[in-house]
Amino acid sequence: MTSPTLAVRQASDQDLPQLFDLYRHLDPEDAPPPAPDAARGILKQLSRYEGSGVFVGEVAGTLVASCTLIVIPNLTRGGSPYGLIENVVTHTDFRQHGFGRRLLDHAAEAAWEAGCYKLMLMTGSHRPEVLRFYQDAGFEQSKTGFQKRRVPPRPEG
Protein backbone atom coordinates (compact mmCIF):
# COMPACT_ATOMS: atom_id res chain seq x y z
CA MET A 1 0.00 0.00 0.00
CA THR A 2 1.36 3.44 -0.90
CA SER A 3 1.36 6.34 1.52
CA PRO A 4 -0.85 9.31 0.75
CA THR A 5 0.83 12.39 -0.71
CA LEU A 6 1.97 14.96 1.83
CA ALA A 7 2.06 18.66 0.95
CA VAL A 8 4.38 20.65 3.24
CA ARG A 9 3.95 24.40 3.68
CA GLN A 10 3.94 27.21 6.23
CA ALA A 11 0.84 27.44 8.42
CA SER A 12 -1.61 30.28 7.90
CA ASP A 13 -4.36 31.79 10.03
CA GLN A 14 -6.88 29.56 8.28
CA ASP A 15 -5.01 26.48 9.55
CA LEU A 16 -5.36 27.33 13.23
CA PRO A 17 -8.51 25.28 14.01
CA GLN A 18 -7.02 22.14 12.42
CA LEU A 19 -3.63 22.86 13.96
CA PHE A 20 -5.18 22.99 17.44
CA ASP A 21 -6.89 19.65 16.77
CA LEU A 22 -3.54 18.22 15.69
CA TYR A 23 -1.81 19.50 18.84
CA ARG A 24 -4.10 17.24 20.90
CA HIS A 25 -2.06 14.36 19.46
CA LEU A 26 1.06 15.97 20.92
CA ASP A 27 -0.23 16.28 24.48
CA PRO A 28 -3.92 15.69 25.23
CA GLU A 29 -3.48 17.24 28.70
CA ASP A 30 -2.01 20.50 27.38
CA ALA A 31 -3.79 23.78 28.07
CA PRO A 32 -6.26 24.78 25.36
CA PRO A 33 -5.02 27.13 22.67
CA PRO A 34 -5.41 30.87 23.04
CA ALA A 35 -8.43 32.71 21.67
CA PRO A 36 -8.41 32.98 17.86
CA ASP A 37 -7.19 36.60 17.84
CA ALA A 38 -4.35 35.77 20.23
CA ALA A 39 -3.40 32.71 18.20
CA ARG A 40 -3.29 34.75 14.99
CA GLY A 41 -1.06 37.26 16.78
CA ILE A 42 1.33 34.52 17.90
CA LEU A 43 1.54 33.13 14.37
CA LYS A 44 2.28 36.62 13.04
CA GLN A 45 4.92 37.17 15.74
CA LEU A 46 6.65 33.93 14.73
CA SER A 47 6.85 35.13 11.14
CA ARG A 48 8.81 38.21 12.25
CA TYR A 49 11.82 36.01 12.97
CA GLU A 50 13.31 35.50 9.53
CA GLY A 51 13.26 31.80 8.60
CA SER A 52 10.98 30.88 11.51
CA GLY A 53 7.51 29.48 11.28
CA VAL A 54 5.06 26.70 11.89
CA PHE A 55 5.31 24.10 9.14
CA VAL A 56 2.38 21.82 8.42
CA GLY A 57 1.95 18.65 6.42
CA GLU A 58 -1.38 18.24 4.69
CA VAL A 59 -3.02 15.18 3.14
CA ALA A 60 -6.19 15.73 1.11
CA GLY A 61 -6.98 18.97 2.93
CA THR A 62 -6.29 17.61 6.42
CA LEU A 63 -3.34 18.68 8.57
CA VAL A 64 -1.60 15.48 9.68
CA ALA A 65 1.80 16.70 10.92
CA SER A 66 3.48 19.87 12.12
CA CYS A 67 6.59 21.33 13.69
CA THR A 68 7.75 24.80 14.66
CA LEU A 69 11.14 26.22 13.69
CA ILE A 70 12.58 29.25 15.46
CA VAL A 71 15.70 30.83 13.96
CA ILE A 72 17.60 32.52 16.78
CA PRO A 73 20.06 35.37 16.13
CA ASN A 74 23.49 34.71 17.57
CA LEU A 75 26.62 36.70 18.44
CA THR A 76 28.98 33.72 18.29
CA ARG A 77 29.90 31.47 15.35
CA GLY A 78 30.58 34.51 13.21
CA GLY A 79 27.06 35.76 13.77
CA SER A 80 25.44 32.63 12.33
CA PRO A 81 22.03 31.94 13.83
CA TYR A 82 20.91 28.57 15.14
CA GLY A 83 17.59 26.81 14.85
CA LEU A 84 15.32 25.31 17.46
CA ILE A 85 12.55 22.87 16.59
CA GLU A 86 9.56 22.46 18.89
CA ASN A 87 6.07 20.95 18.87
CA VAL A 88 6.81 18.04 16.53
CA VAL A 89 3.56 16.13 16.09
CA THR A 90 1.96 13.66 13.71
CA HIS A 91 -1.70 12.70 13.98
CA THR A 92 -1.87 9.19 15.46
CA ASP A 93 -3.84 7.89 12.45
CA PHE A 94 -1.08 9.06 10.09
CA ARG A 95 2.06 7.82 11.85
CA GLN A 96 4.52 5.40 10.24
CA HIS A 97 4.15 7.01 6.79
CA GLY A 98 7.29 9.20 6.98
CA PHE A 99 5.31 12.42 7.42
CA GLY A 100 7.10 13.52 10.59
CA ARG A 101 10.44 12.89 8.91
CA ARG A 102 9.37 14.98 5.89
CA LEU A 103 8.43 17.88 8.21
CA LEU A 104 11.76 17.68 10.03
CA ASP A 105 13.63 17.58 6.70
CA HIS A 106 11.67 20.64 5.55
CA ALA A 107 12.44 22.50 8.79
CA ALA A 108 16.14 21.58 8.50
CA GLU A 109 16.27 22.88 4.93
CA ALA A 110 14.61 26.14 6.06
CA ALA A 111 17.17 26.44 8.87
CA TRP A 112 20.08 25.94 6.47
CA GLU A 113 18.58 28.48 4.05
CA ALA A 114 18.40 30.95 6.97
CA GLY A 115 22.14 30.44 7.58
CA CYS A 116 21.83 28.40 10.78
CA TYR A 117 25.00 26.61 11.79
CA LYS A 118 23.11 24.04 13.86
CA LEU A 119 19.61 22.81 14.51
CA MET A 120 18.45 21.57 17.90
CA LEU A 121 15.42 19.90 19.38
CA MET A 122 14.57 18.35 22.70
CA THR A 123 12.12 15.64 23.57
CA GLY A 124 10.71 14.68 26.92
CA SER A 125 10.08 11.17 25.66
CA HIS A 126 12.24 8.27 26.72
CA ARG A 127 10.46 5.81 24.43
CA PRO A 128 13.00 4.03 22.22
CA GLU A 129 10.86 4.44 19.08
CA VAL A 130 10.67 8.23 19.58
CA LEU A 131 14.43 8.55 20.15
CA ARG A 132 15.07 6.33 17.11
CA PHE A 133 12.72 8.55 15.05
CA TYR A 134 14.84 11.62 15.79
CA GLN A 135 18.09 9.76 15.20
CA ASP A 136 16.80 8.38 11.89
CA ALA A 137 15.90 11.97 10.95
CA GLY A 138 19.59 12.91 11.32
CA PHE A 139 19.62 14.31 14.86
CA GLU A 140 22.26 13.04 17.25
CA GLN A 141 21.86 12.76 20.99
CA SER A 142 25.07 14.59 21.76
CA LYS A 143 24.37 17.17 24.45
CA THR A 144 22.73 17.29 27.84
CA GLY A 145 19.56 19.34 27.92
CA PHE A 146 18.27 21.28 30.88
CA GLN A 147 15.10 23.25 31.32
CA LYS A 148 13.53 25.41 33.95
CA ARG A 149 9.78 25.87 33.92
CA ARG A 150 7.88 28.76 35.35
CA VAL A 151 5.92 27.86 38.44
CA PRO A 152 2.40 29.27 38.16
CA PRO A 153 1.58 31.79 40.88
CA ARG A 154 -0.66 30.56 43.70
CA PRO A 155 -4.10 32.10 43.89
CA GLU A 156 -4.51 34.45 46.83
CA GLY A 157 -7.20 33.73 49.27
Image (cartoon, rainbow, N blue to C red):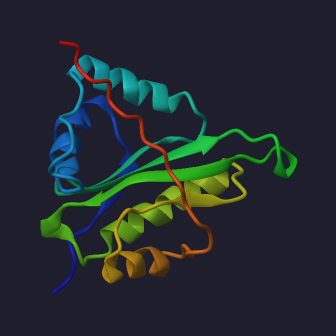
Establish if 122 lies above or below 132: above
Q: Position of residue 47 (x, y in %)?
A: 49, 31
What residue do we see at 24% from left, 55% from top? 26
| Residue at the extreme top of the image, as rendered | 157
User: Whole-percent x and y of residue 68?
Assistant: 43, 47
Q: Which quadrant of the view contains residue 58? A: bottom left
State the residue in front, 14 or 146: 146
Say how many tags the image has.
Answer: 0
- Image quarter for residue 3? bottom left
Q: Residue at x 15, y 45 (%)?
A: 21
Q: Position of residue 95 (x, y in %)?
A: 22, 72
Q: Residue furthest bottom?
A: 1
In the rendered view, does 68 fall on the left or right side of 14? right
* Nearest to the observer: residue 124 or residue 121: 124
Q: Measured along the vertical axis of the image, is residue 88 above or below residue 78?
A: below
The image shows residue 156, relative to residue 106, as above or below, that is above
Give the quarter of the figure containing the N terminus: bottom left
29 w.r.t. 154: above or below:
below
Quadrant occupied by the C terminus: top left
Report x, y in % for residue 92.
16, 66
In the image, 152: left or right of 18?
right
Which residue is most to the right? Answer: 78
Closer-to-camera residue (53/79) = 79
* Residue at left offset 48%, top offset 45%: 148
Q: Write the residue at 29% across / 58% down.
A: 89
Asked whether, in this view, residue 56 is left or right of residue 35, the answer is: right
